[in-house]
Image (cartoon, helix red, strand yellow):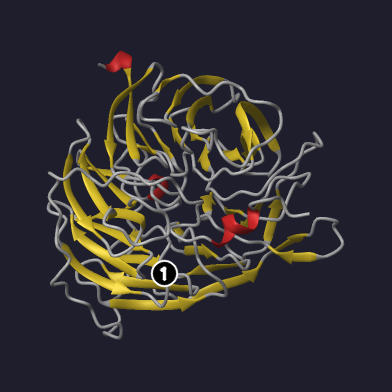
Amino acid sequence: MVPRGLVWLSLLGCAACPPAPEASAPPAEVARVELLPVQEVPPNEPPVTAAAPAVASVGGQWSTFHGDAGRTGATSAPAITKPTIAWKSKVGIQSWLNGPVVASGVVYVPSCGTKHDRSDEGDGVRALDLATGKVKWTTPFSNDANGIAFADGRVFATSDDGNLYAMDAATGKVSWKQKGARKMYAHPLVLGKTVVVADASGVVRAFSVADGRSAWTASLQGTIRGGPAADDDRIYVATVEGEVAALSFTGRTIWKKAVSRPDFDGKRSVPISVYAAPLVAGDRLLVPFVRDTYYPVPALVALDKKTGEVAWRASDTTKASWGNIRSTPALARGLAVYGEPYSGDVVAVSAKTGTLAWRKTVGPCYFPQWASPAIATTTVYQPRFDGTVYALDLDTGSLLWSVFLGSAAAAAPGGPARASTSCEWEPPSGTFALFSPAAVAPDGTLLVGSNEGFLYAIRDRLSK
C-alpha cells in the first residue's frame, strides 16, 4: 500500500514540495531589479565549443549545489563546534532545490516567494552580505526560482517559468535568459565557459556563459529534477523515469542506461525514479532514488562511471526498514551520508561497497525528508524535516549538536523534543520544515533555509 501523501509529494512543482503557510513579502526597502528589457537569445545559434570543467576545489567557494561539480557536498572549511545563529534574513520560502551559493563574501539564494508552486511577487533571487545577512539586491522572476550557481561574475538560476536566467552578480541585472521546453527545476552546472541545465521535458541544455548562445542539447526519457553532475571529462544526469546517462562536454551520449530495482514483493523489476542530482564518487556514480514504501535496503545504487553498469546496490544486514531518497548524499572519507526518510535518522553508506556504515536516530520520525546535507572537514550538517539542523561526527555518527530553525521566533541551539515513535507527515503547528540543501561558506559559516521563508547563518561561538 502506498503511504498517505507520497503521491502528492511526487506531483507538485517548485520543486515538488507541499504547500506552506503564506509568508510575508521581502522587505520593501530592498531594491528590486527590473527584468525588462531582456535579450532572449535565439535557441538555434551556431554551437559553442565546451571547455574543460571548472570543478570547485575543496575549501573554495561554495559556488554551486553541493559545492562542486561532482556534487560531493564536502569542504575543508572549519567545522562548527559551538553553534550560534549569527543572523537570519527573510528571503522567501526555501524549497528542496533552493540551496544558497556563496562567492566573494556574498550569498546568492533562490526563492519560491510566498507560496509554493505559484507565481507571486516574492519569486526570484536575492543577494545577501555573508557577514550581516543584509539584502544587497533582489531580482524578481515570474514564477518560483529553483537551482542556482555562480561563475565569472554571473549568477545563473532556473525557474518554474521555464527559463534559465543569467544575472550580473554585483547588481542582479539580467544579462540574458534562455527558455527550455518546460519548467526548469535543475541545479545549473557551470563547466568552463558553458552552463548546463535540464528541464521537465527531459532535455539537457548547454549555453554559453557569456551570452547565452546555445551550445548543444541532449534528450533523455523522463523529467529531470535534480540536474547534472560532472567529473573531469563527463556529465551525468538521471530522470524520474529511471534513465541515467553520461554525456561528453559537447553533448554526445557516451552511455545511456535504464536503471531498475526490484518491486515491493521482489517478483519483477521496475524503473527507479530519480529526483536528486547524482553524486560522483571516484569511479562510481551514486544515484539515490524514490520508490513506493518501506524496503529492507536503502534506495541507493552505484553505477560504473565508464560503462553505466550497476556496480552495487546498497545493502543492510540489520533487517531495518528503509524509505526512498529524494536528496543527494554528501561524500567524504569514503562515506555517503544522507537524511533517511520514514524515520528520524541520519545514515552513512560505504561509497565503495554500498554497505551500511552507521545509522543514528537524531530526532522525531517523519515520513518526508528532502534536504541534502553538507560536510565540513569531518562534521556532517543535516537539516531535517522536523525543523532542526543536526551536526554529527562523520566517522561514527555521534550527535555533536543541533540547532532548531523551525520557527523564527524560537530558533536557537537545541532540537525538538522527541515525539512518539510513530511517524508523522507534517510538523506540529508553528513548526516549519527544513527542505533546502545545506551550504558551507569558505569561512565555515553554515547556511540553511527554512520553509517559513528565512535563511539562517550559523557560526561558531569560539570564532567570534
Horizontally, is 268 left or right of 253 in the view?
Answer: right
Quarter of the figure that contains the C terminus: top left
Task: Find residue 350 and report its image quarter.
Answer: top right
Residue positioned 17% across, 75% down in the render: 39
Q: Is residue 304 visible?
A: no
* Most foreground residue, 122 or 279: 122
Quarter of the figure that contains the N terminus: bottom right
Q: What residue would you read off at disc 1?
A: 183
Task: Find residue 344 and report its image quarter.
Answer: top right
* Most foreground residue, 421 or 402: 421
Q: Residue 313: x, y in percent?
A: 71, 51
Residue positioned 45% across, 56% down in the render: 231
Q: Secondary structure at mark 1?
A: loop
Q: Residues within 10 Å of mark 1 (few under 14, many from 20)?
A: many
Q: Residue 128: x, y in percent?
A: 21, 41
Does residue 162 sit above or below 281 in this rendering?
below
